[in-house]
Image (cartoon, grey):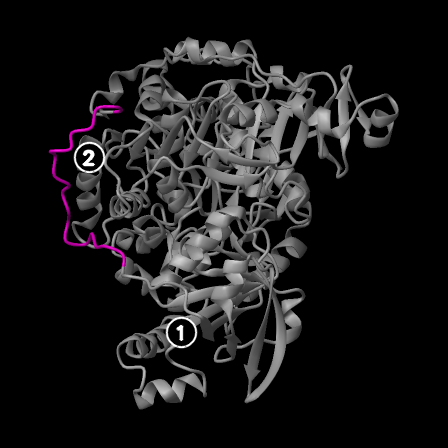
């Protein structure tokens, strides 16, 4: 399905030449990189004067109601007076989550007041999920959009979009830049046409399965082109594109054609069309070739989108594959006792799911839901345990489904149709029963992403599938089935879709029209960030958590779901940090923080002296650190880092960072992003100490290597730490203590 060439190549004359062959023909990688679509877009947005290191300014930004309060609060504390670019505030993550009383709606009221005061765009709850709205209203050829959500991807329209932590959006609000080295660009060459019953999620899962484990496209730009693109409708392209986040790439961009132009015209924005295609001789750092005609319906089993199998393979090897999932459950959730085996769900040779969901930016598109309706065709999904819910991604999508009759067809089958909401993607909606198995056309199936709480004896599961096969499974009473087997009609390359923006009459359109006299409306849960001090001369850290999983997700660092209701109160939210991964972490970190706060006021206190182990309390700060192998896969939520900082965190220790966005969050919140080669060899455990002498001077000098003393069981040894690829601004932020301090100074 996917052929991987993890080496450089040129695209010339409609075919690919290996690096050596291209150079022999007179081509060079240096000139060839300028022929990519990505290069042209990045060049147009770069302000540095050099394409080796970029300082980017974006055309627009977007945030949802888990992130925008913190972003605006940070920017306000740093001198914000007005939004300098279009900034869209959507309300799609906590619109149906009732945890915490009034605090979710309080944040929505705050968001509207901020849009009025600073000149932004406010999309009320239930109107649209963030990425559907940005596709409909903002994406266009050659643009760049920054979003505080990891699935910020609008590449199919020719837009390079990047999902980042909140502090990076704050920089744009303060007229600063997004700074990165020029990224690798990977060609994704599509040929053929999908078979009937194969949907965009199937293509996406095949790509993720082929690339994630080896990091082939990590922090790269994926550039889609080839004859197969013309065989995909706009929604189909969007469905593949939004899932590129799960490959760990930086961004994506597609070639554009008549399908894109017609889609933009249907949305009243024909002027945003721009023809994009790679130039002859374009150079790519790697090549993925996808023959769409060979892609099969897929299922990504718990606990990652890359844990992908064809449904055919899954059904042929149920016992073995489910046994592996059982083992992964105990290991990933760190359970003392194994829950009941998923193999109990095999009946008469078939595996039965308990729930289906088609939702969000990946699943809730018009084409996906229309195809699901066509497959179901009003046939009942039954009255037993299995049930199916659908969330159209926006009110215009819901209106079109109603106008064309697809909505009535879904309802006639017994499908529960809801408003635009992202909850099923992060554990705040349609939480399955204990032991239940949910199949979802959504973005993620990380541990607890469905909303269960293993620490309280609750374990449930999510597998990712395409809407077409979810509909086929629903016809079979929940027995997992491939839509390829049903003889369904093929997806059309162009879908006649009528966009009616009257559904957005409640949207507040205030871009470029700030009203400084407006007062921000603060609910009782909205709190300012605790004060952070500048980097001291030396640091003496206590390891508060040590995680040896191959990858640690941001959901494990700060759980999603109902905890996100507290996102506007840093102190309350920090109580949940690592709660599902290491329940003792918060207590350990707070104990260190209490002594550090005492040190600042009374450095001669005996309790401080006891904690310092002979180090000078006037020049040495106390703090905590989290050690993990590869942290930060998943969400862009800055809280994964800020909660550690609120609890007195000063550093991360790891072998590598899973994503650029998490590492940026660590830096922007004033924590040192250390890497340690082969970190597992040190057998670091909670309670171990790390003394880092002269860390402030090392940052000021620009050192990339720092030697620390690791103290374990009273014995000390040197550990080489690395601080690689920090920009001058990164170092200044770390020296200041956090981004807020940096701008305040």
Q: Is residue 422 magenta?
A: no
Magenta-tinted stretch: 511-529
Q: Position of residue 459 (x, y in %)?
A: 44, 60
- The residue that disc 2 covers is 112
Spot occupied by residue 96 in the image (x, y as percentages of width and height): 26, 43
Can you give x and y, in whole percent of width and height, for residue 505 in the image?
21, 20
At 18% from the left and 33% from the top, the residue drawn is: 117
Q: Are marks 1 and 2 in contact (CB under 8 Å)?
A: no
Task: Tell me the element at label 2.
Answer: helix
Name above or below for residue 657 compared with residue 216. Answer: below
Q: Residue 75: x, y in percent?
A: 29, 44
Q: Is residue 522 magenta?
A: yes
Query: Where is 8 relative to 273, above or below?
Result: below
SS for callout 1? strand
**Image quadrant assignment for residue 591:** bottom left
Residue at left 55%, top 88%?
713
The residue located at (28%, 29%) in the rendering is 127
539 and 366: which one is in front? Answer: 539
Q: Is residue 174 found left or right of 8 in the rendered image?
A: left
| Dot 1 crowding, Cα within 10 Å, few <14, some 14–19, many 20+ | many
Say if 745 sits above or below 614 in the image: above
Q: Judge from the rendering whether residue 709 lies leftward or rightward of residue 418; answer left or right.
A: right
Mark 1 / mark 2, whichever is N-terminal = 2
> Is residue 359 at least partly visible in the picture?
no
**Label 1 belongs to which residue?**
621
The quadrant holding residue 285 is top right
């Amino acid at each position: 399905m996917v052929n991987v060439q993890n080496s450089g190549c040129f695209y010339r004359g409609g075919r690919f030449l290996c690096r050596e062959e291209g150079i022999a023909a007179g081509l060079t990688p240096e000139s060839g990189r300028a022929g990519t679509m990505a290069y042209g877009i990045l060049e147009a947005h770069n302000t540095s004067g050099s394409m080796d290191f970029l300082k980017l300014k974006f055309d627009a930004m977007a945030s949802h109601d888990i992130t925008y309060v913190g972003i605006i609060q940070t920017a306000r504390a740093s001198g914000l007076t007005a939004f300098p670019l279009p900034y869209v505030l959507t309300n799609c993550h906590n619109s149906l989550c009732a945890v915490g009383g009034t605090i979710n709606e309080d944040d929505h009221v705050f968001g509207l007041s901020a849009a009025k005061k600073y000149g932004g765009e406010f999309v009320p709850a239930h109107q649209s999920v963030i990425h559907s709205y940005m596709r409909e209203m903002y994406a266009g050829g050659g643009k760049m959009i920054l979003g505080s959500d990891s699935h910020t991807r609008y590449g199919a329209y020719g837009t390079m979009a990047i999902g980042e932590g909140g502090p990076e959006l704050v920089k744009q609000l303060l007229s600063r830049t997004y700074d990165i080295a020029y990224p690798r660009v990977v060609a994704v060459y599509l040929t053929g046409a999908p078979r009937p019953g194969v949907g965009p999620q199937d293509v996406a899962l095949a790509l993720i399965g082929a690339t994630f484990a080896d990091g082939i496209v990590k922090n790269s730009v994926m550039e889609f082109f080839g004859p197969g693109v013309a065989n995909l409708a706009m929604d189909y392209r969007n469905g593949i594109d939004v899932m590129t986040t799960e490959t760990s790439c930086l961004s994506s961009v597609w070639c554009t054609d008549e399908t894109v132009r017609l889609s933009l015209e249907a949305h009243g924005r024909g002027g945003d069309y721009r023809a994009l295609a790679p130039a002859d001789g374009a150079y790519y750092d790697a090549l993925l070739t996808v023959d769409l005609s060979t892609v099969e319906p897929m299922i990504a089993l718990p606990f990652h989108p890359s844990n992908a199998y064809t449904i055919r393979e899954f059904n042929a090897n149920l016992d073995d594959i489910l046994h592996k999932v059982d083992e992964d459950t105990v290991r990933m959730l760190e359970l003392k006792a194994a829950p009941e085996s998923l193999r109990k769900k095999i009946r008469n040779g078939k595996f039965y799911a308990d729930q289906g969901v088609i939702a969000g930016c990946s699943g809730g598109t018009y084409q996906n839901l229309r195809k699901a309706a066509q497959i179901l065709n009003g046939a009942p999904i039954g009255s037993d345990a299995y049930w199916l819910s659908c969330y159209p991604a926006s009110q215009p999508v819901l209106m079109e489904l109603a106008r064309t009759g697809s909505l009535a067809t879904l309802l006639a089958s017994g499908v529960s149709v809801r408003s635009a909401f992202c909850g099923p993607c992060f554990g705040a909606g349609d939480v399955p029963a204990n032991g239940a198995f949910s199949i979802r056309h959504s973005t993620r199936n990380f541990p607890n992403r469905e909303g269960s709480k293993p620490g309280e004896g609750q374990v449930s599961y999510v597998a990712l599938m395409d809407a077409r096969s979810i509909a086929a499974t629903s016809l079979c009473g929940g027995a997992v089935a491939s839509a390829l087997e049903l003889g369904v009609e093929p997806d059309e390359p162009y879908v006649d879709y009528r966009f009616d923006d009257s559904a957005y009459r409640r949207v507040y359109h205030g871009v470029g029209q700030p009203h400084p006299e407006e007062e921000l409306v603060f609910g009782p849960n909205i709190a300012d960030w605790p004060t952070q001090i500048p980097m001291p001369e030396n640091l003496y850290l206590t390891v508060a958590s040590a995680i040896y999983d191959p990858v640690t997700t941001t959901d494990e660092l700060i759980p999603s779901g109902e905890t996100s209701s507290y996102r506007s109160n840093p102190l309350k939210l920090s109580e949940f940090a690592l709660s599902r991964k290491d329940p003792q972490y918060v207590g350990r970190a707070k104990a260190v923080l209490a002594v550090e706060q005492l040190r600042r006021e009374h450095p001669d206190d005996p309790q401080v002296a006891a904690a310092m182990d002979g180090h000078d309390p006037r020049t040495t700060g106390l703090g905590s650190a989290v050690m993990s192998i590869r942290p930060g896969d998943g969400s862009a939520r800055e809280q994964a880092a800020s909660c550690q900082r609120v609890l007195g965190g000063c550093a991360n220790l790891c072998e590598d960072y899973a994503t650029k966005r998490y590492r940026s969050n660590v830096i922007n919140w004033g924590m040192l992003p250390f890497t340690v080669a082969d970190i597992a060899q040190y057998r670091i455990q909670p309670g171990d100490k790390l003394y880092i002498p002269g860390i402030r001077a090392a940052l000021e000098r620009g050192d990339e290597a720092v030697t620390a003393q690791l103290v374990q069981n009273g014995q000390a040894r040197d550990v080489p730490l690395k601080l690689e690829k920090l920009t001058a601004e990164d170092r200044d932020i770390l020296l200041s203590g956090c981004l807020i301090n940096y701008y305040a100074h």
